[in-house]
Amino acid sequence: MTLQQLRFLTAIVESDFNITAAAAKLNATQPAVSRQLLLLERELGFQIFSRNGRGLSRMTDAGEKVIEHARRALHEAQNIKKVSADLNDPRRGSLRIGSTQTEARYILPPAIRRFRDLFPGVRLTVHQGTPEQIAEMARAGRIDVAVAAGSRDLLDTLAIHPCHRSTWRVVVPSSHPLAKTATPSLAQLGAYPLAFHLSSLTESALHGVFGEAGIEPHIILTSRDAETIKEYARLNLGVGIIADIAFDADGDRDLAILDVSHLFPEETAWAGFPRKGVLRQYMYDFLRLLAPDLTRENIESARSRERSPAF
Amino acid sequence: MTLQQLRFLTAIVESDFNITAAAAKLNATQPAVSRQLLLLERELGFQIFSRNGRGLSRMTDAGEKVIEHARRALHEAQNIKKVSADLNDPRRGSLRIGSTQTEARYILPPAIRRFRDLFPGVRLTVHQGTPEQIAEMARAGRIDVAVAAGSRDLLDTLAIHPCHRSTWRVVVPSSHPLAKTATPSLAQLGAYPLAFHLSSLTESALHGVFGEAGIEPHIILTSRDAETIKEYARLNLGVGIIADIAFDADGDRDLAILDVSHLFPEETAWAGFPRKGVLRQYMYDFLRLLAPDLTRENIESARSRERSPAF
DNA sequence: TACAGTTACGGACCGCGTAAGCATA
DNA sequence: TATGCTTACGCGGTCCGTAACTGTA
């Protein structure tokens, strides 16, 4: 059994049991991968995959166990490489970020800008997706850190620490009747069609807030994209309700902004990172740039906790 | 980086940084091990061990991390091998048991006898030691299961499940005055020199029991070995107090036996097994032979609990 | 001088890629 | 016939063991 064989093995699984595709990913030829798989299977004395005529079809029961352990072994090998990389050139490597839309648009950019100046040798990639997709990317080891709003449960493959809290703002054209209201009530909002910027706050939770006040809101749009919400507000199609960070004092000066923090629950964006394994030094540095509270100490403490705290 | 290199690496550490000794253990030549270490260090770009003139002296800081991950990677590779071994010949392998003295003497033998009949192809080894030594053997992966009395804290490298509870018996020559007492009191015992069979019950706990009754016992002997206690009792050097399992109805018919369960706390012997990794099928079978309560289900549940329950 | 680790050298083996074979849809 | 895994073959590299070398106690 060699690490190479285990690498091939997991690549096959991650290519949906297609050896040809796995070989391409691995920069190897298809026969090489096939042969190593056969050799490993012969050494272990059983089939890891079941074959049905042309191609592999699925894992055997024993194969599933083998692959699970193989992944872990490779993970540890990766960790050794990371220790080495950090020692040899702490300013070079890659940083893969999974992020939800609002966070990618409004929270990440300043941190990324500063990070790129500090670490020009680190190849940065941002993968945008839903919290579910981000959790899945984390599970598969395709991202190093996550920055996501959303239920904490969705991110339970990661250790998390709060990195930003946002409150809510109403945006309306300056000419809109609400524009002169200092602090609108739910009832006042409920009088207009609403365009709501949703990220972790779900549509049902939103209806709950209004429902408790006995109001049936007309929600004309929900979107994860704040720019769309603002566009609806500009066109007076609805009263826009967005996260505070989504308001741009320069670009949005045609819109009036009203603080409605008191009406809707504050929303937490989380920084997420793997529970196990080695983090490169620059990963700690990046998280620190995201929020001053993300010190190495806080990160390690979140990583060692079984479940992240209620905060 | 190859698994072989990691194997060599950990062998060096386990041979106290002596490459020659490591090579012997590995059935390899000394240059082979040395060369692979050098190659790995060159690939990683830093020294794993510091050299001082002749020989290696200690690990570097980075080296310690590397070795930690290497151990884990090898452990996973081992797990794959175990899956394979179980599938290919579930009746062949090795079973290394760590056990405290009383348990090795009185609890293990019947289980071992039945196990040997069922699995003649499994090479059995029992390592006797103190609970501390057993915990250390478990940490180093030198035993597969443990059977030990002793504080649960001492065994916290293992998942544990109770496998036997023993109560206390007084043994005295038939002619001894106590021999006619049905249930002796602490005061009655305190009137004689005592020879006490200690295993998990500590000497200070023992004094505590008497102390609460305002009695200052004369303890003439404490020993982990019940046979020694019985010998003292035979010679009338002291009243013997032993765990119930240590009394042999046949061999000890010259001794009178009295139940003193009510006087001293019941003592639990634990079965211990690794929290992580694959257990061979026959290991589950062995544990089941030890105590019917040690079902596969109970074992897995103990393994998955963070800390074993108070019982 | 004894002991431990490193370097030198030659042979065996292993793993790769190219190319051909084989089995399904 | 196209696709995808397996087998055949030859080459290059790697790893090993033997043997010689180097550097401390």
Image: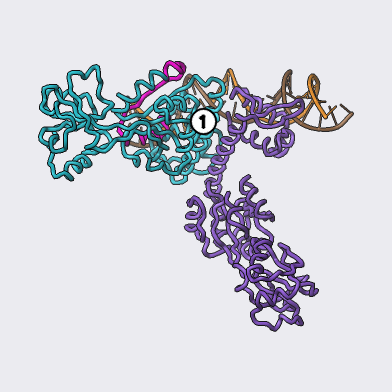
Chain colours: A purple, B cyan, C orange, D brown
Question: Residue at 53% across / 54% down in the picture?
Answer: A281
Q: Nearer the viewer, residue B157 or B186?
A: B186
Segment tinted magenta in the rendering? B115-144
Where residue B223 sits, quadrant-wise, is top left
Q: Establish if B124 lies above or below B210.
A: above
Point out the residue furthest to the bottom here. A180
* Quadrant of the drawing holding the C terminus of chain B: top left
The amino acid type of the residue labelled 1 equals Gln
Where residue B232 sits, quadrant-wise, is top left
Q: Establish if A198 lies above or below B122.
A: below
Residue A122 x, y percent position in the rendering: 62, 54
For residue B249, side relative to residue A1 (left or right) = left
Chain designation of label 1: B
Q: Nearer the viewer, residue A130 or B285?
A: B285
Q: Establish if A224 lies above or below B247.
A: below
Where residue A195 sits, quadrant-wise, is bottom right
Residue B216 x, y percent position in the rendering: 12, 41
B306 magenta-colored: no
Question: Residue at 50% across / 57% down in the picture?
Answer: A309
Residue B183 x, y percent position in the rendering: 18, 32
B143 magenta-colored: yes
